[in-house]
Image: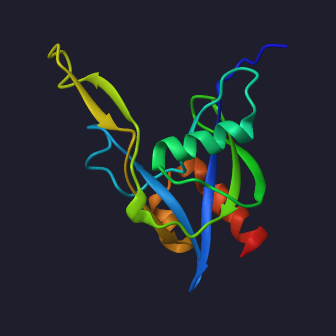
Amino acid sequence: MTRTSPISAGLLAFRRRSGLEVLLAHPGGPFWAKKDAGAWTIPKGLAEPGADLIETARREFTEETNLVPKGELIRLNAVAQKSGKIVHVWAVEADFDLTRFASNTFEIEWPPKSGRRSAFPEIDRIAYFSLPAARGKILTYQRPLLIELERRVG
């Protein structure tokens, strides 16, 4: 059986401080540079056909943040992007030292039609947010993840 829609896998890291806080990532590159509200995401990436989704989620998280998630994973309901891509997500409790953050890079033609290629970090910054703040920061299609996380561990 072949799949018809692309699949991604990612991790939603959370910690308990004065309430539940989630780790979100701001996409790098010129398109996202001036966007904030509704632009943040969970670290995630494309899963190759037949790939183990948990391993993909762990790998992508580390590639995009330079942080290594450890601990029990909590399966959350998958969410769908407008494009039809399905994103499988696991939550993991982790209080990371964010000074260790570093992201892999991607290359695009920039400025457009200039013939020059420039490299940008896939993620340009990460931060922990309280759930109310995270609701305003995260991409709309990922908001159900925050609701489910709060219901299950909050």
Q: Is residue 138 left or right of residue 34?
A: right
Can you name the residue that lies furthest to the right here? 1
Can you name the residue that lies furthest to the left here? 114
Q: Residue at x 39, y 58 (%)?
A: 37
Q: Residue at x 30, y 23 (%)?
A: 108
Q: Is residue 94 left or right of residue 121?
A: right
Q: Residue at x 64, y 24 (%)?
A: 6
Q: Residue at x 71, y 76 (%)?
A: 154
Residue 93 point in image, percent of width and height: 67, 66
61 shown above or below 119:
below
Residue 39 visible in the current orientation? no
Q: Is residue 142 left or right of residue 119?
A: right
Residue 123, quarter of picture: top left
Residue 70 point in image, percent of width and height: 67, 58
Residue 86, quarter of picture: top right
Q: Quadrant of the N terminus?
A: top right
Can you name the residue that lies furthest to the bottom here? 18
Q: How is the image coloured?
A: rainbow
Could you tell me how many numbered marks the image carries?
0
71 shown above or below 33:
below
Who is closer to the viewer here, 133 or 25?
A: 25
87 shown above or below 3:
below
Residue 149 point in image, percent of width and height: 70, 64
93 shown above or below 1:
below
Who is closer to the viewer here, 34 or 46?
A: 46
Residue 139 visible in the current orientation? yes
